[in-house]
Image: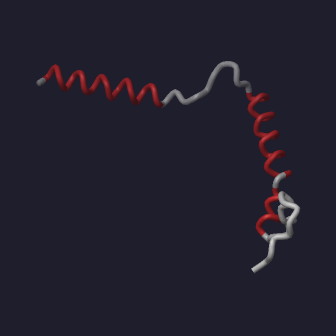
Amino acid sequence: MKRIMAIAVTIVTVAALSSMGGCATLTDTPGANANRIGLTMDTNLRQIPSGAENIFLLDRPSTLTNAPVPLH
């Protein structure tokens, strides 16, 4: 019984210690992290007007067909 408990404690300890490390790597510098965050924010902010047009239904209808589509 002691052996099973020791194995269980060891497994839990290894799992806890491995999950505390996170995803940090030595190649990810603070400058690279700031650049990635800046690019992400820039991309997201550029997409706001397009998203607003879709939300308020200001975008043009699709022109995938030559025949007019009747509105109900």
Question: Left or right: where does residue 24 sit relative to residue 42?
Answer: left
Residue at the outermost front position: 67
Question: Left or right: where does residue 20 sit relative to residue 26?
Answer: left
Image location (x, y in percent) of residue 65: 84, 60
Residue at left offset 82%, top offset 45%: 43
Asked if 64 appears above or below 27 in the picture, the reply is below
Which of the 4 image quarters holds residue 24?
A: top right
Residue at left offset 86%, top offset 66%: 67
Whether residue 49 appears in this view of the structure is no
Near-viewer residue (59 or 34): 59
Image location (x, y in percent) of residue 56: 80, 71
Which of the 4 image quarters holds residue 5?
A: top left
Asked if 16 appears above or below 40 in the picture, the reply is above
Residue at left offset 77%, top offset 42%: 40
Question: Left or right: where does residue 23 sit relative to residue 68?
Answer: left
Whether residue 43 appears in this view of the structure is yes
Residue at the outermost bottom position: 72
Image location (x, y in percent) of residue 62: 83, 61
Near-viewer residue (18 or 46): 46
* Quadrant the C terminus occupies: bottom right
* Quadrant the N terminus occupies: top left
